[in-house]
């Protein structure tokens, strides 16, 4: 990031800001970027790490959402597809087009006419609401073409199916890159900085009391924005009575070795006996399945996959794929909470709207709730429009054509220690990949693998500390890289070695280093045991494509 976390913390203590954003998920960092790009003096604080909540545990799709058409959320789909195109333009190194197969199965050799019409209408409607902006319309493909793209699809009864197009991104890296872009535009952005209370004058909220690295400080701001995601109600409660506007929904995903599925595209898989569908998508050396959508009333800080969650996805996959997956195939899993808005009579969280809401409290704190990853920029625009109105200024949103850090022309073929490294780095850092290759040139040992079997390099851990505000072992293995999601137990096995790299950069003593390793491994074990999964020490075999 521009400057350092230490510099950001010093600014938080010494400066007065136009706007203070609480929350470092995709919505919060999007607000910080929008505000900073409009010339506002901007600060952001995040209790844990950037994207440590929902924003690192999504389905990783930048999409309109075909299933929202069924809910007649046409405007949401239209807006999301417009935002998809903006992200493809502003972050081409991070957001990539991902085709999807929508398989159609015949009953007794015949596809029901009602189903055929419904699917065809949905595909055309998706194109018309903005899907075609990607430059490709949906198409019908025969069963052989469908199985060429997703070889594991069950062949029996497979009829001519549909192929349509959306996009995919590493959610945590996208969030971090937005935060970095905000910092480069002048925002003071600090992770691992907790809000303990709100500051008020004459009944108006004018800042927050925060704690970072054991030090307390007061942050003064004219406007405070609550972008706490599923923790938004908790932040609102600092101002007054407990709020209860959100209905968290848990979504889980599991990753299996790519060789088990061998898909080059995503696919939607209807679950027998359920009104929902699941999906499978490729991601480097794994294929991942998602997602559940269930009410959640447990601890917000540690949602876990359960054995029932895992079995739901495995059973759904085995029902439409020519595979026989079991828990032993699962090399990674993650559970995230969607901050859905209350206000519907539906009993199913899957039926709740993904639209967002912006409100202002009696004390003047602006809160944004709801929404989805794809529409973060539009949510941020709506919030900052309200901020500038409060400030009495007239300045329009500038993020529609604002490239994110690394989006400059990317030079492929940068010399690397082995084939594929240049593409791997370019797909994560874009034009900033040269800083990684520079580290490797200075110390060739940094060109070695960070976690054996995964594409991440030791240089990436060093870069994460020096330029991406990584402060903990979990920051590096869970979010700066996605080692924990792609190979949970292999990442735990490499934890001690990675901790030594971080210790040299962060000045940890042996006790701190040991505590980081112990804490990370304990967290991984708890995650695995909560899901009822066996240990899988080996990373997935390479698929030929590096994970981003």
Image: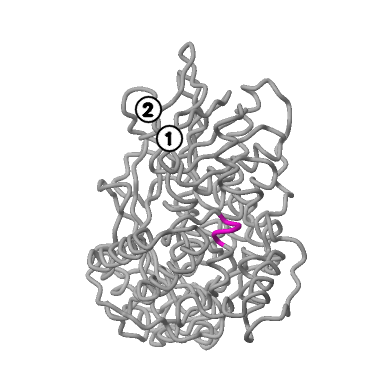
Query: Is 266 on the left-hand or right-hand side of 289?
Result: right
Q: Quadrant of the C terminus?
A: bottom right
Label 2 and label 1: CA atoms lie apart by 10 Å
**What is the number of callouts on the image?**
2
SS type, badge 1: strand
Q: Is residue 250 magenta?
A: no
Q: Which mark is residue 499?
A: none
Measured as percent of width and height from the top left, residue 354 is found at: 46, 46
Which is nearer the eye, 534 or 471?
471
Query: Is 391 on the left-hand or right-hand side of 292?
Result: right
Could you tell me which residue is drawn at 34 percent across and 74 percent down?
489
Could you tell me which residue is drawn at 23 percent across and 67 percent down?
529
Q: Quadrant of residue 394?
A: top right
- Above/below status of 190 relative to 461: above
Magenta segment boundaries in residue numbering: 464-468
Residues packed near mark 1 inside 10 Å, few (<14), some (14 to 19) or many (20 plus): many
Disc nearer the start of the sequence (2/1) = 1
- Above/below status of 242 relative to 548: above
Foreground disc of the pair 2, 1? 1
Give the residue at mark 2.
238
Which is nearer the eye, 267 or 421?
421
Q: Main secondary structure of the magenta part?
A: helix
Which is nearer the eye, 251 or 410?
410
Measured as percent of width and height from the top left, residue 179 is found at: 59, 49
Tell whether label 1 touches label 2 (CB within 8 Å). yes
Q: Is residue 466 magenta?
A: yes
SS type, badge 2: loop
User: In this orientation, does residue 101 appear?
Assistant: no
Measured as percent of width and height from the top left, residue 37 is found at: 70, 40
Give the residue at mark 1.
195
């Amino acid at each position: 990031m521009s400057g350092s976390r230490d510099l950001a913390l010093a600014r938080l203590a010494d400066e007065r800001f136009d706007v203070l954003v609480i929350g470092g998920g995709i919505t919060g960092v999007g607000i910080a970027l929008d505000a900073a790009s409009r010339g506002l003096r901007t600060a952001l604080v995040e209790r844990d790490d950037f994207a440590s909540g929902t924003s690192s545990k999504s389905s990783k799709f930048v999409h309109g959402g075909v299933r929202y058409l069924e809910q007649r959320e046409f405007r949401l789909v239209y807006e999301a597809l417009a935002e998809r195109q903006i992200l493809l333009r502003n972050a081409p190194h991070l957001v990539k087009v991902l085709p999807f197969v929508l398989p159609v199965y015949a009953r007794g050799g015949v596809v029901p006419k009602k189903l055929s019409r419904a699917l065809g209408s949905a595909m055309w409607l998706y194109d018309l609401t903005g899907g075609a902006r990607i430059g490709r319309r949906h198409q019908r493909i025969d069963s052989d073409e469908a199985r060429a793209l997703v070889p594991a699809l069950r062949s029996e009864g497979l009829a001519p199916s549909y192929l349509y197009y959306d996009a995919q991104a590493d959610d945590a890296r996208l969030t971090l890159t937005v935060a970095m872009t905000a910092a480069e535009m002048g925002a003071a952005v600090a992770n691992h900085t907790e809000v303990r209370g709100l500051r008020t004058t004459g009944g108006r909220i004018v800042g927050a009391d925060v704690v970072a690295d054991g030090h307390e400080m007061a942050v003064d701001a004219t406007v405070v924005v609550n972008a706490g995601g599923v923790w938004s109600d908790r932040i609102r409660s600092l101002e007054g009575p407990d709020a209860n506007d959100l209905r968290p929904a848990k979504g889980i995903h599991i990753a299996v070795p790519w060789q088990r599925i061998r898909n080059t595209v995503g696919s939607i898989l209807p679950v027998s006996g359920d009104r929902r569908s699941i999906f499978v998508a490729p991601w480097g050396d794994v294929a991942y399945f998602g997602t559940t959508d269930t009410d959640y009333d447990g601890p917000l800080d540690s949602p876990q996959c359960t054995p029932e969650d895992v079995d739901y996805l495995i059973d759904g996959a085995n029902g439409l794929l020519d595979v026989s997956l079991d828990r032993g195939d699962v090399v990674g899993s993650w559970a995230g909470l969607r901050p859905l808005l209350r206000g519907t009579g539906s009993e199913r969280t899957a039926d709740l709207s993904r639209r967002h809401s912006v409100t202002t409290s009696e004390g003047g704190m602006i809160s944004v709730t709801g929404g989805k990853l794809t529409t973060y920029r539009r949510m941020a625009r709506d919030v900052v429009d309200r901020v500038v109105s409060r400030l009495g200024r007239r300045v329009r949103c500038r993020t529609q054509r604002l490239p994110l850090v690394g989006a400059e022309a990317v030079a492929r073929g940068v010399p690397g220690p082995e084939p594929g490294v240049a593409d791997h780095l370019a797909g994560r850092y874009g034009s900033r990949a040269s800083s990684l290759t520079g580290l490797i040139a200075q110390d060739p040992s940094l060109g070695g693998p960070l976690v054996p079997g995964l594409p991440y390099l030791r240089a990436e851990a060093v870069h994460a500390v020096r330029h991406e505000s990584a402060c903990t072992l979990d920051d590096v293995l869970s979010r700066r890289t996605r080692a924990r999601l792609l190979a949970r137990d292999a990442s735990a096995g490499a934890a001690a070695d990675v901790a030594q790299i971080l210790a040299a950069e962060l000045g940890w003593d042996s006790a701190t280093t040991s505590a980081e390793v112990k804490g990370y491994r304990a967290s991984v074990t708890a995650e695995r045991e909560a899901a009822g999964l066996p240990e899988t020490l080996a990373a997935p075999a390479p698929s030929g494509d590096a994970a981003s």
